[in-house]
Structure formats: structure tokens, C-alpha cells
Amino acid sequence: MDIATIIGLVMAFGCIIGGAIIEGVHISALIQPTAAMIVGGGTFGAVFVSMPLPAIISALKAAKTAFLPTKIDHAQVVKDIINYATKARRNGLISLEQEAQSVKDPFIKKGISLVVDGIDPQKLRETLEADISAYEEHTKHGIEFYESAGGFSPTIGIIGAVLGLIHVMANLSDTSKLGGGIAVAFVATIYGLLIANVVCLPIGTKLKIRMKEEVLRRVMVLEGLIAIQNGENPHFIEQKLMSYTGGGH
């Protein structure tokens, strides 16, 4: 569980609602199903129009990583690569074949298998870099989904506000309907801003950070396996990889 995400959401909504209460706003005034339908439905409807369905499904699944991220331990990555390097230096590259069979990570498994097969180092780099690029492109769909939603929702909130004002103007003679129309107008704007700035854009940013962490891990694996293939000293490999984590400074 990502505690920062939970703390951030609780803090944002808590402070906003708490401030409203202090100002004398009744919570019931902020609960407007009509405004929620307009802003929520309009926002995600617009996103559905702008993106293909597979990308949307992928993005919705990716949201869980903002709350339940896969732990990436860069120090452990370095340790594993050094173990592979030491084993290969002592017993040859073919000794890594067992590692390729036992390791669970698909990227590492593929890389070790290519090293054991004796692929050219340049071909190894190109193959693994292609995998990294494909991962980035796939992951960007989720980021773009939430960034798009964050861009659409304030505008949809304004549409909701305009609709509420139209309702008010059409019922100026009936004062009993004025309050409801004005409430929908202002609350729709609030909903649009909250969806964008408290939910969607922050989730998009968090997914972007998760992607960068995973790309860094894969780059470390790539550089480590190429160094192993070139027969470099394990200590030198460790120093090279630690520079990616800031440990070499």
C-alpha cells in the first residue's frame, strides 16, 4: 500500500471539506448528484472518445499501482546482477542457464537467455531496448488517460455550471427552484476542479514516476547483462550500476 497516496487524498479532501465547514458551508450543499453525473459522465465520456478501448482498459487497471505499487529495490537489482556476474566469471556464461529457468521476472529471464545463447552484444542491447520502449509506450496509455481526464474535467465542470445557470434563468419567476439551480452550477465547477487536481492529474503523475522507476530497473539489468557478456569485473559492474541509483556519488 502506498501510504503517500492515501495520506494525500485524505489530506486534500479533508482540508477542502474542513475549510468549507469552517466557512459555514453545509456538507449537504456539496452533494449534488446532478452535478456529479454531468461532470463525471462528461469527463470520462470525453476520454472514451479520445482513446481506444484497449488503452482505456489498461489505464483503469493501472490505477491500482497508485495505491498498490510493485516494490522496486534497485539495490537488490545490483546485488542480483553481481551474483550473475560472479557466477559467469567463475563458470562461464553457460552457467547462467539455470538462472534463466528459475528467475521469475520476464525481462531478466529474456536477457539472461540471450546472453547464454551467445547473441551479439549490440543485438542484445537492441532487443532489450526495444522491450523497454514497448513497455514505456504501453504504460503511457495509463498516464495519458488520467492526464486527459484531468484536462477535460474542469471544462466539463464549466458546462455543468452553465447548465445550472440556464436552469436558474429559465425559472426566475419560481424562486423555489433558484437555489437548486445555483447549487448545481457552483458545485459542478468544484467537482470538475477536484476530479482534475486531486484525483486524475496526481494519479497520472504517480504512474509516470512508477514508469520511470521500472525503466531505470530495466536499464540497469540491460547494462549489467551486457557487462557480464563482455566479461567485465564484477566489482566494476557494481560501481557502474550503483551510479544509476545515486550510490556511486
Image (cartoon, helix red, strand yellow):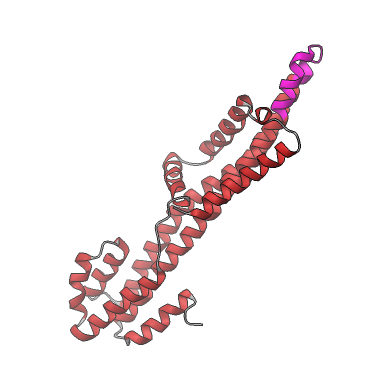
Looking at the image, can residue 152 be seen?
Answer: no
The residue furthest right is: 173
- The answer to whether residue 189 is left or right of residue 220 is right
- The answer to whether residue 224 is left or right of residue 37 is left
Rendered location of residue 64, percent (x, y): 44, 47
Rendered location of residue 70, percent (x, y): 39, 57
**For residue 137, what is the image quadrant?**
bottom left
Rendered location of residue 81, percent (x, y): 32, 75
Q: Is residue 171 magenta?
A: yes
**For residue 217, what is the image quadrant?**
bottom left
Frontmost residue, 136 versus 158 = 158
Q: Residue at (18%, 70%) from the top-left corner?
A: 98
Rendered location of residue 41, percent (x, y): 56, 31
Frontmost residue, 127 versus 238 = 238
Q: Is residue 80 above or below residue 25?
A: below
Looking at the image, how many numbered discs can be counted on the residues? 0
Report the predominant secondary structure element of the magenta stretch: helix
Q: Residue at (46%, 45%) from the top-left corner?
A: 59
Query: What is the span of residues highlighted in magenta in the rendered image?
Result: 168-185
